Image (cartoon, rainbow, N blue to C red):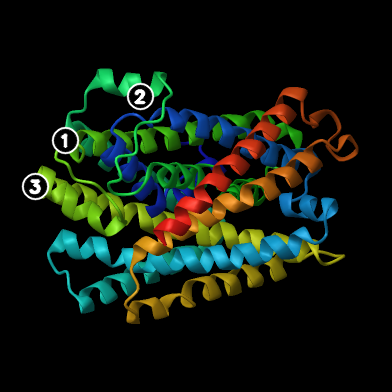
Amino acid sequence: MQAAGPGIVFLLSSIGPSDLVSNSAAGANFGYALLWTLLVIAAARFVILEASARYVIATGESLLQGYRHAARWSSWVILGAIVMRRHLSNLYHVLLLGLAPGFLLGWDSGWSRTAFSLASAGLAFAVMYSGGYKTVERFSKPLAFLLGLTIFITMLWARPDPGEVLSGLARPSLPEDNGGGLGLMLVIVMLVGTGVGSLSNLKYSAFTFEKGWRDPSFLKKQRFDLIVSLAAAFLIAALLQVTAAAVLQPAGLTLKNAEELIPLFTAALGDAGRILMAVGLWTTVFTTYVGSNTGYSLLVCDILSSMRKTGLSPAQRSKTFRGLLIFFCLSPIYVLWTSWKPVPLVIASSALMTLAVPLVTLLLLRITTDRERMGRYVNTPLATAAMVLVTLASLAVTWQGAAALLKRL
């Protein structure tokens, strides 16, 4: 943990309720058969994140400043996408922040969910507003430990089949879609959307920039930081799939939304399942709420700075960052007084982010192959080929998944 930097914040800001739903649905509906997709997703994510951070380190600029060099209009497109993504995500984050404590304490009613949501969201806001990125980084370390420990204990309690786990990792195949729960293609789109979701991945470059890793002397440290982060993300996602495959599938319990997680694990594992999943769900939602609002606020600061000839001064950047936190955190509170449910928001948010992968990856490809700016840190042929492959693959998945999403909605 002492060596952890932007990667630990990125890890927790990226593992959210969408990951819980998509990976638990993969295990509950298709057993261990989709574990191999996590290896592919991790490899694709490394390609994108490594290139993003390498741009920051090689040029000393933020990634979004680089995007503006490549295409000035991209700043407005990404700004609009960030505002939509953050609001949509915060709607279901706020709802879920009140769900888990109620199940844990046995106080699950309308007023208790509202009270728990406001208390959790208020605590998260205080963490972000009080000290910015540095405070969030310090806060992330114990939460990362708690999240990993909770999921690991749940997996041990489930007693999965080691042979089936190895087979799911080593033998790529697509299982038969049995029509129960979420469909196969929609689950794959959700896995890709949460694992390779382009806007989410932009946060790592923002955390790298904010950390001060802006020259080549940090390259080795940054790559180690990234490898540790992605290894942990892979492990958590795999544990979720394995646990659901061991607990839910044998019992014939299929998963459709995050609200079903705690009742389903309670039915399968009793009070232990209720406690573990409630703690895991709250920790996941809280950490991604903190990390994502911090990351996207920093990204918007980068966009606004790139639009000004003189950029933003440290004082202006700090003031803008705090203003964005207030907007992102307060604007979705109205959802507590609606009848909306988390599941359509989770599915729509994950799938919509997949649509942005080709655009952002192509822009990243363009700026990281610019030898004038990147110098000796320009893309290698292998990195360029990998980024092209990721873009083409995301287009194929998006095309097939759009139809599946429309059918579900």
Q: Amino acid at mark 2?
A: Gly
**In this orientation, which residue lies closer to the viewer: 246 or 291?**
246
Label 3 – label 2 distance at C-alpha: 27 Å
Q: Residue at x 53, y 41 (%)?
A: 7
Residue to which mark 3 is pinned: 270
Q: Tell me which numbered mark, 3 or 1, is placed earlier along the sequence.
A: 1
Distance from the alpha carbon under mark 3 to that under mark 1? 15 Å
Mark 3: few/some/many CA within 10 Å (<14, 14-19, 20+): few
Answer with left or right where residue 45 lies relative to residue 231.
right
User: In the rendering, at what x and y percent does residue 32 appear?
Assistant: 31, 29
Q: Is residue 64 above or below residue 301?
A: above
Give the structural element (helix, strand or loop) at label 1: loop
Where in the figure is residue 378, as x and y percent of width and height? Answer: 80, 31
Left-right relation of 146 to 13: left
Q: Quadrant of the C terminus?
A: bottom left
Q: Residues within 10 Å of mark 1 (few under 14, many from 20)?
A: few
Q: CA distance from mark 1 to mark 2?
A: 16 Å
**Labels 3, 2: front one:** 2
Mark identifier at residue 250: 1
Find the residue positioned furthest to the left.
270
Where is residue 92, by image quadrant? bottom left
Q: Residue at x 17, y 41 (%)?
A: 252
Q: Secondary structure at mark 3?
A: loop
Image coordinates for residue 131, horizontal then vertical, percent: 52, 62
Residue 35 sits in quarter: top left
Q: Which mark is residue 168?
A: 2
